[in-house]
Image (cartoon, grey):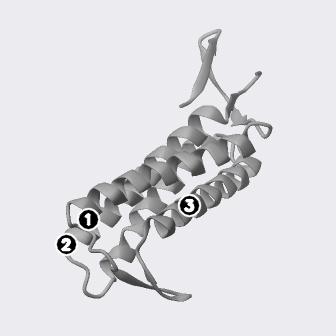
Amino acid sequence: MQNTETTGGETIVRDEGISWKRLPPVALLAALFAAVANALVYFAASQLGFIPQGFVIRMTSGEMPLTVGLVAITSVAGAVGAAVAFAVIGLFARRPVELFRVVAAVALVLSFAMPLTIPGASVATVLSMEVMHVVAWAVIVRLLTKLVRKEAGA
């Protein structure tokens, strides 16, 4: 959101920034909330039969079963990566919140590719994984941009 001020008929855009003091605890909070929210999605999808027990996915480190632990770990990793990206953007951008939201939206769209490449995954399994991506994105982006934002002059 742009912070503007009008003086003498001229509109001035004031910069916004990041509260560096709040970034680490909010990043941890975002990681925790994303992991818990995705664990709930995982349990619901598993109970509905959308994610079969013992379903295996191929990762760079080898094959791994899709478990609630893996879901939680990858949710935390996503939150840490988002916080680092937000921090880097905050160092250089005049409006880091706005730019971070764009970068995060692009990352979300790109993340949709991974579940589509899993051999043997049903449509329900792929959609369940895509929902987890959206849930993590929504929780992480919302918390980071709302709780870490520092308005100019603040």
SS class, disc 1:
helix
Q: Is residue 17 left or right of residue 108?
A: right
Q: Give the amino acid at mark 3.
A: Gly
Relative to residue 30, is residue 37 drawn left or right? left
Q: What is the number of callouts on the image? A: 3
Q: Is residue 58 above or below residue 82?
A: below
Crowding at mark 3 (Cα within 10 Å: few <14, some 14-19, many 20+) = many
Q: What residue is drawn where x is 59% and y is 55%?
A: 79
Q: Secondary structure at mark 3?
A: helix
Q: Nearer the viewer, residue 81 or 43?
A: 43
Relative height, residue 130 to residue 93 (above, below): below
Mark 1 → mark 2, Cα distance in angstroms = 6 Å
Left or right, residue 32 beside residue 153: left
x and y percent of residue 146 in the render?
57, 33
- Which of the 4 image quarters holds residue 108? bottom left
The Cα atoms of the two marked residues, 2 and 3, are separated by 23 Å
The residue located at (19%, 72%) in the rendering is: 123
Q: Residue 151, percent across and down?
A: 69, 26
Residue on which disc 1 sits: 127
Label 3, label 1: how far apart the Cα atoms are? 19 Å
Q: Which residue is mark 2?
A: 123
Return the disc, 3 or 1, that comes first in the chain's sequence: 3
